[in-house]
C-alpha cells in the first residue's frame, strides 16, 4: 500500500500498486511540472521507483490566484 | 535520473532544459537564472533600492529570499486586501518570513485606506480580480515612488508572463502587448518595474521554496473562482508537455521580434497620461481609477 497526501487541501489517497512517480502523476491527472512529489523530505523525479509502504506528499504547484 | 552537473541523484527534472538537478545544483541553477534575467534585461544594480511586492505566495517569497541572498538592498511590501479567510494568513506568512530573514517590510492596509476588497466587491459590479489588481498595482507604484525606491520588483514567473502574453495575443491588445516584458522603465509617474523570475516556471519556484523551506501561503483567493488565467495556464502547460521549451520560446520570441512593433504603435496611437488631480498618480482621466473607486465605494454607488 502506498499512501499519498495531496496539498493544498490535505486529501489522502492510497494505492495498492504503483511502480513509479510518473504512474502516480498519471493516476492523479497531473503533468510532470504540475506537482512536486516528495518522500521523506526528498523530491522524486518522475522516473523514480516507488515501494510498498511509501508515504508520499504531492504538492500541486499551479497557483490559483 | 542523474544530476546533469554533478551526476548525483537528481531531485528535479526540467524537460525544457533537457536537464535534471540535485538539490545544491538546482539552487545554483535558480540563482543563475535570476542573475541572468537581471543582467540581460538590465533590471537593477547593487546601488538600487528594490521594493519587492510580497503576496505571501511561493513566487514573491522565493524572489525576496533570492534577492536578499544575492546581497541586494530589498524591502518587502505587503498590501493587505482585508479578504476574509485569505489576507490574514497571507499577511502572517509574509510577516513571519520577513522576520526570519531580518528583512524590512512595509504593510499597506486597504481597510485603513477605505478600500477593503470585500466592500469594493459589494459596491463595484465589475470583475473583482481586475479591480483588485488595479488597487494593488496603484499602491505598489505609489509606495515605491513615495518611499524613494528605485525599482519595484514582482514575483511574476515565466508561466505568469506567458499566460498574460497569450491572453493579450488572443485579443490583439496592442496597449498591453506594448508593455509586456520583464523590465519597464520609470516614466510618466511610474516606478521602474522588473520581474526577475521571468526565466523560471512556477514549478521551479515551488521547488526552490521546498528546498529553502520557505513556508508560503497556498490557499486560493476565495474570490478567484473561475478566473480565466488558470485556464490559460492549463492550456499552455498542455502545449509545454507536448513540446518542452515552447513557453520560453513563445515569450523570448515575442520580446525579441514583436514587442517593439507594439511599443511603436502605442507611442503613435496610445493615450497620453497626466497626474491624477487627487493623488498625483498617472492617469488618462483626470481622476485616477483608484481615486474614482474610493469615491464610488465611499458613496455606496454600485456601477
Image: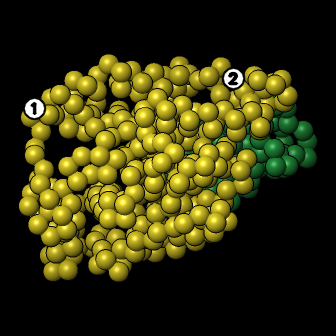
Label 1 sits on a secondary structure element that is helix
Q: Residue at x 15, y 29 (%)?
A: B265
Mark seen at residue B150: none
Q: Quadrant of the N terminus of chain B?
A: top right
The correct choice, above or below, for B116 with respect to B240 in the image is below
In the rendered image, what is the letter of the chain coloured green?
A
Q: Residue at x 64, y 49 (%)?
A: B69
Distance from Cα at disc 2 to Cα at disc 1: 44 Å
The residue indicated by pointer 1 is B268
Mark closer to the chain start, 2 or 1: 2
Label 2 sits on a secondary structure element that is strand
The residue indicated by pointer 2 is B19
**Picture quadrant of residue A7:** bottom right
In the rendered image, what is the letter of the chain coloured yellow?
B
Chain for numbered disc 1 = B
Local crowd at mark 2 within 10 Å, few (<14), some, or many (≥20)?
some
Amino acid at each position: 500500500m502506498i499512501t499519498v497526501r495531496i496539498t493544498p487541501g490535505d486529501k489522502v489517497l492510497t494505492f495498492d500498486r504503483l511502480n513509479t512517480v510518473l504512474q502516480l502523476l498519471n493516476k492523479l491527472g497531473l503533468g510532470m511540472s504540475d506537482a512536486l512529489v516528495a518522500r521523506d523530505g526528498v523530491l522524486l523525479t518522475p522516473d523514480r521507483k516507488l515501494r510498498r509502504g511509501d508515504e508520499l506528499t504531492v504538492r500541486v504547484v499551479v497557483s490559483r490566484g | 535520473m542523474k544530476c546533469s552537473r554533478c551526476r548525483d541523484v537528481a531531485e528535479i527534472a526540467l524537460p525544457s532544459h533537457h536537464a535534471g538537478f540535485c538539490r545544491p545544483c538546482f539552487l545554483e541553477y535558480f540563482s543563475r537564472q535570476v542573475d541572468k534575467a537581471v543582467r540581460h534585461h538590465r533590471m537593477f544594480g547593487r546601488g538600487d533600492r528594490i521594493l519587492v511586492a510580497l503576496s505571501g505566495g511561493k513566487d514573491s517569497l522565493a524572489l525576496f529570499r533570492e534577492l536578499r541572498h544575492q546581497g541586494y538592498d530589498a524591502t518587502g511590501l505587503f498590501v493587505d486586501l482585508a479578504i476574509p479567510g485569505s489576507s490574514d494568513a497571507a499577511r502572517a506568512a509574509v510577516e513571519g518570513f520577513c522576520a526570519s530573514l531580518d528583512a524590512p517590510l512595509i504593510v499597506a492596509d486597504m481597510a485603513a485606506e477605505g478600500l477593503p476588497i470585500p466592500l469594493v466587491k459589494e459596491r463595484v459590479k465589475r470583475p473583482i480580480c481586475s479591480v483588485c489588481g488595479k488597487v494593488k498595482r496603484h499602491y505598489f507604484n505609489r509606495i515605491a515612488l513615495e518611499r524613494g525606491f528605485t525599482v519595484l520588483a514582482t514575483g511574476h514567473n515565466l508561466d505568469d508572463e506567458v499566460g498574460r502574453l497569450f491572453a493579450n495575443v488572443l485579443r490583439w491588445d496592442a496597449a498591453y502587448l506594448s508593455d509586456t516584458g520583464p523590465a519597464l522603465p520609470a516614466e510618466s509617474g511610474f516606478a521602474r518595474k522588473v520581474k526577475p523570475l521571468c526565466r523560471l516556471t512556477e514549478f521551479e519556484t515551488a521547488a526552490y521554496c521546498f528546498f529553502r523551506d520557505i513556508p508560503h501561503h497556498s490557499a486560493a483567493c476565495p474570490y478567484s473562482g473561475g478566473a480565466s488565467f488558470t485556464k490559460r495556464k492549463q492550456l499552455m502547460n498542455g502545449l509545454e508537455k507536448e513540446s518542452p521549451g515552447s513557453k520560453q520560446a513563445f515569450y523570448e520570441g515575442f520580446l525579441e521580434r514583436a514587442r517593439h512593433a507594439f511599443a511603436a504603435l502605442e507611442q503613435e496611437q496610445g493615450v497620453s497620461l497626466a497626474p491624477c488631480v487627487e493623488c498625483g498618480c498617472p492617469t488618462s482621466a483626470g481622476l485616477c481609477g483608484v481615486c474614482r473607486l474610493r469615491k464610488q465605494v465611499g458613496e455606496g454607488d454600485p456601477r
